[in-house]
Amino acid sequence: MRDRADDIPLLVDSILQRGGNTKHRVCVEPQAMAWLQAHDWPGNIRELRNVLDRARLFADDGIIRAEHMPDEFRRGVATRLEVLPADPPARGRAGTSDEELTRLVASFAGTRRELATGLGMSERTLYRRLKGLGLA
């Protein structure tokens, strides 16, 4: 079964294509997309649409950035993601080392989905790695 966070980029793209000015294409920077994927979305798609509509108003250059997200939204997601590296480590197919992954799991306060998103891997891949390390 696919993770719900995997659907967020598709929903974001669909919402951005349908709303606003059709002359200018709006896109979302990777950091902002990671925050969108890490959010729990208690208001479901309606909340996502409202956040994107608001962010679009601030995206003068056609790029929705992390600073365009609502303050309360940014605080909640940033608090959970603050122990993650800014960019996923580029280490080939192996990804994050076992030692680094163990350290991140011990210090991370968010959900497994948020950790996986911050590391640039699927939740299923993260679970397999954790199980292999005896952490799941």
Image (cartoon, rainbow, N blue to C red):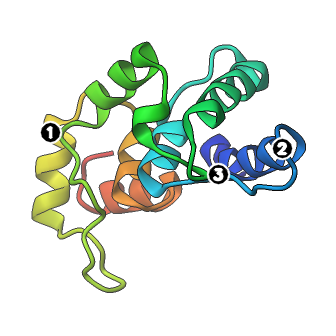
Mark nearest the camera among 1 and 2 is 2
Q: Is residue 30 left or right of residue 136?
A: right
Residue 10 position, x and y percent, is 75, 52
Q: Residues within 10 Å of mark 3 (few under 14, many from 20)?
A: few
Q: Residues within 10 Å of mark 2 (few under 14, many from 20)?
A: few
CA gap between label 1 and label 2 equals 45 Å
Residue 128 position, x and y percent, is 42, 60
Q: Residue at horizontal 77%, vertical 45%?
A: 16
Say which residue label 3 marks. 6
Q: Residue at horizontal 23%, vertical 47%?
A: 84
Residue 108 position, x and y percent, is 22, 35
For the C terminus, which image quadrant? top left
Point out the residue furthest to the bottom here.
92
- Relative to 80, say whether 71 is above or below: above
- Relative to 47, say whether 9 is above or below: below
Q: Is residue 27 left or right of residue 105?
A: right
Say which residue label 2 marks. 21
Contact? badges 1 and 3 (CB < 8 Å): no
> Callout 1: helix, strand or loop?
helix
Q: Earlier in the sequence, mark 2 or mark 3?
A: 3
Residue situated in front as seen by the camera: 5 or 126: 5
Mark nearest the camera among 1 and 3 is 3
Q: Residue at horizontal 30%, vertical 64%?
A: 88
Residue 109 position, x and y percent, is 25, 27
